[in-house]
Amino acid sequence: MTQVTNTTRPECDKLNKRTADWNSIYPFIEWLHENKMCIGVWRDPDAPYTNDFTGETGTIKEMAEYLLEHPYPYGQSIENLLYKYFDVDPAELERERRELLESLQPEG
C-alpha cells in the first residue's frame, strides 16, 4: 500500500473538525423536511425573481405571496447548506478527497 503524504488538505481538515456538529445538524434539517418545514432566506421584496424551473418572472413579494399557499424548500441540499455553514468549498473538498484516494492507490 502506498504511504499517504503529509499534503495539506484544508477543506478536508475543516470538515473533519466539525464532524460532530455535522452529525447533529443534518438530522435536524431532515426532521424539518419530514415535518413540512424549511429554512428560508430574507430578501428585498421588490427585487426581481425568476423561477429557474418554470421561467416565470416577478418580484420577491409576488413569489412570497404565492409561497404562503405553496411552500417549497429553500432549494439547496442539506449537504450544501452545511458546507456553507462550515465554510467548506465542496468542489475543493472533492478535489482533496480524490487526491487522498489517489495517494492510497498501490503504485505500479
Image (cartoon, helix red, strand yellow):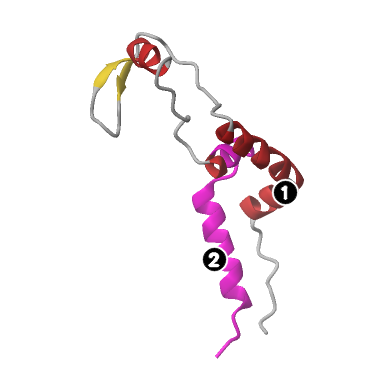
Magenta: predominant secondary structure element? helix
Residue numbers of the magenta segment: 81-108
Q: In which quarter of the image is the N terminus?
A: bottom right
The amino acid at mark 2 is: Arg
Instruction: In the rendered view, tell whether residue 89 sits above or below residue 93.
Output: above
Q: Does residue 42 appear to the left or right of 51 in the view shown?
A: right
In front: 82, or 28?
28
Q: Quadrant of residue 56 in the image?
A: top left
Say which mark, if any, is on residue 51.
Answer: none
10 Å neighbourhood of mark 2: few (<14), some, or many (≥20)?
few
Residue 62 x %, y %: 33, 12
Q: In which quarter of the image is the C terminus?
A: bottom right
Upstream in sequence: badge 2 or badge 1:
1
Read off the residue under disc 2: 98
Q: Nearer the viewer, residue 81 or 66?
A: 66
Residue plotted at (30% across, 32% down): 52
From the viewer's perspective, is the residue at label 2 or at label 1 nearer? 1
Q: Where is residue 76 in the image (x, y as percent from the top left)?
A: 47, 37
Please give the residue where the numbered disc 1 appears in the rendered image: 19
Indicate the position of residue 94 as horizontal and vertical percent values.
Answer: 53, 57
What amino acid is labelled 1 in the image? Thr
